[in-house]
Amino acid sequence: MSWIRTREIKDPAACHDAFVNSDFEAFPKETGDFLCKLIQIGMDRVWMARYSLSLPQVDVFSIRPERTVIGFLTDSSSSVRYCGAQILPGDIIINRASEAHQQTDRGFHGGTMSLPSNELNAAVEAVVGCDFVQKLAKPIIRPSPALMSRLLKLHKAVGQLAHDNPEIIELPEVCRALDDRLLHLMVRCLAEGAGVEATTGGRRHDAIIAKFEEYLAAHPDRPLYLTEICAGIGVAERTLRAACDEHLGMGPIRYLTLRRMHLVRRALLGAEAKEASVTRIVTDHGFWELGRFSVAYRTIFGESPSETLRRPADRQAAYRNRPSSLPADAIAGGLS
């Protein structure tokens, strides 16, 4: 049985449940009109999505373990860095059930496909006659251009069909045929592609960023300083700056401030105006220079904190103060 889900999200605070198979947090790096356009299609085994992001941003997400998810660029002019690695047009990212960061530019277009994790090896054996668990240990696969082009064309065609004529995909025979064709191309691209090796430095930076996120989540309600953060996670300032620049495209303090600004906004949107205090919410997130904060907040979001609090927005469930509860030692290799 198929399903189709289409969304246009105009506030990054509403992105946390945008994707059906992950927790997704969006932190735009520039001011402007935020827009995430997303179409998701579910078939018997394959789920797929196509999405676009209007603003340059840092995304933090974790994939739920039930499915193996791959991602790729759907527009050759788009640019993304995934866990510090520059992703080229034609590359496939293998996302795992752990926290990851990506940096996107303005006007980004991307796509995903997923398959139940326990079915992937069986599908590979059926299509190409071999097991490739070791290849999946590499986060980036580079298929042949011809194979990847076929996958991208089919992915685009299915997305367009779902947008223009969704009733056709709901026909059982059509759904089964598309599901089988997408699965076949996905498996061939993964099995016949060349794995891109991660550097030792890149793996170490993955672990440092996980430690950094854990430290920020553990101290949400007071100002943090760079020397304190470095001491708390046990890395040199220079190393932390390099890891943040690679993964986040900015320094650690700028990311901390950007992250907390968005968390303040989510808290304001989720609060009852008659019961909540802007001052209390802002200081609870570690900001104490209230005048300076208000100016910065208006610059980023185009309104004052009090206007956000009074806005009749959809009251959502409580927001967590980080995208994932996975511990840093889940990152392969750790810091040792």
Image (cartoon, rainbow, N blue to C red):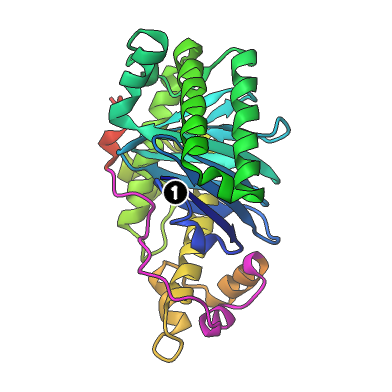
Quick check: 219 left or right of 141? left
Q: Nearer the viewer, residue 198 or 315?
A: 315
Q: Write down the residue under mark 1.
A: 226
Q: Nearer the viewer, residue 61 or 2?
A: 2
Q: Residues within 10 Å of mark 1 (few under 14, many from 20)?
A: few
Total marks in image = 1
Give me the residue at 41% from left, 67% from top. Answer: 285
Q: Residue furthest bottom?
A: 274
Residue 316 lies within the magenta run = yes
Q: Position of residue 214 (x, y in %)?
A: 33, 48
Residue 266 in sight in this render: yes
Residue 244 in sight in this render: no
**1 w.r.t. 87: above or below:** below
**67 w.r.t. 287: above or below:** above
* Secondary structure found at label 1: helix
- Picture quarter with the N terminus: top left
* Amino acid type of the residue that numbered disc 1 sits on in the rendered structure: Leu
Q: Position of residue 126 (x, y in %)?
A: 36, 14
Q: Nearer the viewer, residue 190 or 80?
A: 190
Q: Position of residue 59 (x, y in %)?
A: 51, 47
Give me the residue at 37% from left, 53% from top. Answer: 216
Question: Magenta residues?
Answer: 300-326
Tell me which secondary structure the magenta stretch mostly adopts. loop
Q: Nearer the viewer, residue 268 or 123?
A: 123
Give me the residue at 64% from left, 64% from top. Answer: 300
**261 w.r.t. 160: above or below:** below
